[in-house]
Structures are given as C-alpha cells and as structure tokens.
Image (cartoon, rainbow, N blue to C red):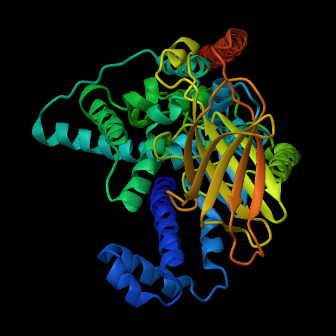
Amino acid sequence: MIRRYRKLTHIAVFVFLVFVPLMSYAAVLYQVFGKGGYHIAELSGTFFENKLYQAYAALLSGFSEPVILTDSIKGSFWSFTIFGYKVSDPLAFLGHLLASGTLFMPLLASILLPVILALILGRVFCGWLCPMNAILELVDDLRGWFQKYFYFSLFSISFKGRNKYIVLAAGLLLAPLTGISIFPLLLPYVAIGREFFSLVFYGATTTIGLLLITAIILFDFMISRRGWCRYFCPGGAMLSILSFRPLLKVERNSGSACNDGCNQCGERCPMALSPGSNITGPECMKCGECISTCPRGILRFRFTSRPAAALPLVLFFILLSTLLSYGSSAHAHHIRGFPHYGYAENYPQIPTAQYGGATGDWDATMVAFFFDGAEELRMSSDTPNDVQFFIHILNMKTNQSYMGRMNFAVKEDGDTLVGQLEGITPLEESAYRVRQTFPRVSGNYTISLRIFPEDASGPVVINVPFEFLRKGPNYRLISVGAGIILCLIGMALYHKKKAISQQTSG
C-alpha cells in the first residue's frame, strides 16, 4: 500500500513539473491573442501553440483574471510559489548567501517549511517527492530485470558515504570564490524542472541538463547501484544533516524477530541500510520499500515522540515564513523561480543583487548580474564594469505586469547622464533586459525607468538607486562558512555512528 501511494505521488510530481510550464506558456499566448482569439492563434501560432491556447481559453476564460490565476502557481522544486506562498530548497538560500554575502529575508523565509519537515520527517523529500529518485527507481528495476533475463552482471561499486558531504562542502565553498551557486548545475531534480520548462517554451532541451541526467542514469545502471543518492547527491547530504534526529523512523516491532538469514529489506533499501536490524539513521529516505518488502510485516513507521508536541513550533515557523514571504516586494512572477531574475543566460543562479523602486501604483524590481566572481578573473576580462539588468515592472493596484515600451537611463551623482536606451521592449514574457557599461565602480548612480502606460495621462518615471558592487572572495565568510559546514558534517557523522553502535549492541 505504501509503495502504491508513493508511486501515485511520483506521478503527481511529474504532472506538476509539466503542468506549470504548460499553464505559464498558455497564459503568455492568452495575453498575446486575447480572449476568443482562436482565428489569430491559428494563423500566428504553431499547431502546439494553437491547441494549448484553445485548451487554456476553454478552461479558464470564465475567470475574470485567468492570467493572474495561472501566475499564482509557478516554479519547480528548486523554488516555487503557490498562491503567494514561496518555498525554496535550503541550498538555494545557502548558495545565495555565500555567493552574494547578503541575507535575503524572503529567501530565508521560503526555506523554513522544508527545514521543519526535514527535522520532523527526515529525508522524506528524497523518498517521496524527488523526481530524480523516481527515475532512478525505474532504472534500478530495469537493472535487476536486465541482469535476471540476460544473465549479465553489472558493476555495483561502493563508495564512501561521506563523499556526498564532500560534494556539499565543495559547492558551498565555491560559492563565495566564484560568486555563483553551483548547486542548480549539480542537482538533477533542478535540471529536470528546467528541461521541462525549456521543452515547453523553446521546443528544445538544454545540453548541460540533459547530459547531467543521462550521466547519472548510466552511472546508476552500469557502475553503482543507486550510487548517486547513496554517495554523491549534495541535496541528500543537506537533508541528512537537517534530519540527524528525526521524529519519524522505521523500526521493527518490539518482540518480533526476522526470519533466519532474511535480509530482503536491506537488499531492497535504496540507501543500503539495515531496517530489520533497526539500523537506519539520518540516511533513511522514508520511502517505505523495506516495509512493503518485509515478508513478515514486522517493520513500520513510528514517531519516536508525540508529533503533536512539535505542532506549535511547526505552526509558528509556517506563520513566520508566510508573513515574511507575503511582506516581500520581490515578485516571483516568472516560471523559473524566486525571486525574479533573468534566466536566458544566467539561470539557475540566484541574482547577485536586487534593487527596487516605486512611483504611485507602479513598482519596479531590478536584478543586476555583475559577472564578478573571483576578483582576479573579473578584472582580467574585457568589460569588467559591465552590468546586465533584468527589470520587471508591476502595477500594484491591478497586479498586472507592464509590457509596453520603456526608456532606460543611468545618471551619476543625480544629474550626469552616463547611459541611455530608448524604446526597449520585453525580451521574455514581461522581463526587460539591458546591459550597461559603467564608467567607474564607485559613485552614486540612479537608474531612471520611463514607462508609458495606456491608462496614464503621461509617462511615469521610476527612479531606482543603484550601487555598483565590486568584490573579491570574502575569506572571512569562507572561513566561518567552512567551520559551520565541518561542524554540521561532524555532528551528522557522530550521531550516525552512535546510533549504529547502539542499535548493533542492542
């Protein structure tokens, strides 16, 4: 029964990953063709776009604001938003914190729910929600079928379990050195969401994401059974650290004994644990495969203490994350996550810096990529003072994105014009992209955005204060971060060793 429910959850996960970009692209088509624009859609769009527009219009045209409704659900498992409530991977927050050296409170708020769930339930995301794990389960079944019917033994090389903690530590240490978070490039469950998005919006997949997923599948199939999840996944390492003493565990019924020589639960366990001997620890993914496999049915999920005791704490953190999330002026209006950022070249990196300004009902969010990374690499480039901006302008009264013409100007010390572009139109959905070369890395700059709303009596000017960031590696931050990481890893390994020794002796 547990296996059936988990398979249904896996199906729901892939439905979500496909449904979100489909609805987002359909909303774009609906904005382009308008309500009842079937004839225009047939003439202007492809067969796929025409059918997608027709389905969207038929299902949602009865709502007064279907685009706003669709836009309320977006993202993937790296970061997503559901009706204004934002949830992000803890590694998204850590990567951004270490890469930029700034604490972005809405991003911190968005990881509270995953952290609380990991503390209580353990690595339940890995076992029930991770799309890559769902794929690798099928690969594992195919591997067993292949060996059974073709009488061909595949490699099953074991590696050290600490390797994934080394990958995690290396990724966190590289963030302040390079100025970017590398985890979105390493985590296959992020790549899967990105590939679905690219396939829907652009009709093609990205090379790097497809290579990563394919390499992991071949590695698990030919070299090491469930090797990625067991030995190398930094996301799993992060969740293992958070769930070093979870409330939910897999245990054998007291007074019950396993059959002599039976180790079916251990053979089936994707993490190579021994649930029949009560040896699980923080590595357990709570998938329930051991419970479904046990021939005597003596394994079960059990809370080590009353879960109701943790309910007030859970509700407090959910309330706190909700207040911080809804109180943010950063709008996650794009499919690719939270907060808004340009993703044509830079996805999936969290922005280096984010700026905002408002005039009347109009709110502007401006994300800047400084191409900074390590100082010596940056200053050796041809354009060290270049900044790329991704700009989103929102009408706070109607919650509609501005998609008209925009003029962009840069002023130094309030009045000296150093750059100007006119007639800029959105490049992707409602995102404006501008690349500007600055004369100096010091000084007070103001970005002036002039827009021309149809319902306004004249142009609206939104001024956004801007500071040109120039930084090298923050070695103090690297040292502190390295110390914290090593302490967390040591704590996790200590508790794991202690739990195994106690369960073995018992």
Q: Is residue 493 left or right of residue 56?
A: right
Q: Is residue 482 above or below residue 35?
A: above
Looking at this rendering, what residue extends furthest in the front direction?
416
Pick the front one: 56 or 148: 56
Q: In the picture shown, does residue 17 fall above or below 475?
A: below
Which of 11/275 is in front?
11
* Residue closest to the eye, 119 or 250: 119
**Residue at screen point 30% across, 42% down:** 139
Q: From this viewpoint, is residue 262 visible?
A: no
Q: Residue at x 45, y 48 (%)?
A: 194
Q: Quadrant of the C terminus?
A: top right
Question: Is 275 displayed left or right of 79 in the figure?
Answer: left
Q: Position of residue 377 (x, y in %)?
A: 50, 15
Q: Is residue 181 left or right of residue 457?
A: left
Q: Is residue 444 visible?
A: yes
Residue sitting at 55 percent across and 49 percent down? 433
Residue at 71 percent across and 38 percent down: it is 115
Q: Point out residue 212 in the picture as x, y percentages from the top left corner.
A: 35, 35
Residue that sits furthest to the left in the current view: 150
Residue 185, position as x, y percentages in the image: 46, 34
Q: Which of the 4 image quarters holds residue 485?
A: top right
Q: Nearer the viewer, residue 305 or 425?
A: 425
